[in-house]
Amino acid sequence: GAGVSQSPRYKVAKRGQDVALRCDPISGHVSLFWYQQALGQGPEFLTYFQNEAQLDKSGLPSDRFFAERPEGSVSTLKIQRTQQEDSAVYLCASSLLGNTIYFGEGSWLTVV
Amino acid sequence: GESVGLHLPTLSVQEGDNSIINCAYSNSASDYFIWYKQESGKGPQFIIDIRSNMDKRQGQRVTVLLNKTVKHLSLQIAATQPGDSAVYFCAENPWDGTASKLTFGTGTRLQVTL
């Protein structure tokens, strides 16, 4: 597609529920990133893939967060046993190696 | 990074005036900087970037200035338009000089009045 596509756009989860957020990067983009953005704050880095390899996952806040990109294209961010503090916008971004990062519209997660 | 929570610094400018949005970065090793614009309900949109071997870069109606001595970055928007109303973030990459892992600064909300 023309841009980074994320789904679902909005997700309400009950505390303790597992959620999966999907990202379709721009076609041909090697690098894929996940960021978390709390209300009123700037995005914070979660993890980074180059093709299917997860090169950096230092930003994942706990072992309840897991990301994968098995075929080097689509990526999924999974959050297990969601907590209220997980409520945020989850932004996916992609780039050609070393070039401008383009962000998607985000998946808005609310944990109730 | 520093957070101001829900109370973002706000800059109000009249339509047609020039806007200057400032950003202080923390890591002297950073050598790649980007400005993003984020409208309500949307993801950050790339505006302009600059590498540390430059002190000024111009785009269409926008100019980024980099002062490495005081670790300061600014975004100048010429002839500000209502469509420029958004939150603006600066981001730095202190790791390898490419846009691989960005640290975002505190955003500034730009309000354009008619």
Image (cartoon, coloured by chain):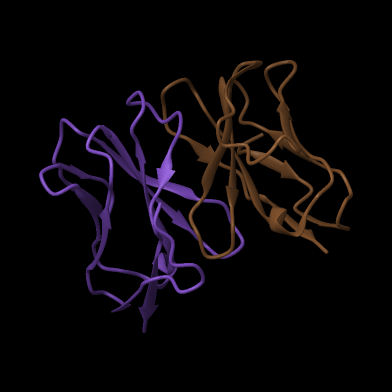
Who's the residue at 37% across and 72% down the image?
Answer: B9
Q: Based on the displayed image, in which of its 4 quarters is residue B13 positioned?
A: bottom left
Q: Is residue B89 left or right of residue A51?
A: left
Residue at 20% from the left image edge and 33% from the top image edge: B52
Percent of width and height locating residue A37: 58, 53
Closer to us: A111 or A109: A111
Q: Evaluate whether residue A111 shows in this view.
A: yes
Tell which residue pokes out farthest to the bottom in this image. B114
Q: Position of residue B47 (x, y in %)?
A: 37, 48
Residue A29 visible (yes or no): no
Q: Residue at x 28, y 56 (%)?
A: B23
Q: Nearer the viewer, residue B105 or B1?
A: B1
Q: Colour of chain A?
A: brown
Expressed as whole percent of the image width and height from the top left, the position of residue A5 reads 68, 40
Residue A2 in the image: above or below residue B3? above
Residue B78 in picture, x, y percent from top left: 23, 63
- Count up the numbered dots: 0
Position above or below: A52 against A33:
above
Residue at horizontal 45 percent and vertical 32 percent from the top: B101
- From this view, report whether residue A78 is shown above or below residue B83: above
Q: Is residue A54 left or right of residue B33?
A: right
Is A85 in front, or is A108?
A85
Tell me where residue A111 sits by quadrant: bottom right
Extreme residue in the front direction: A62
Which quadrant does the C terminus of chain B fall into?
A: bottom left
The chain assigned the colour purple in the figure is B
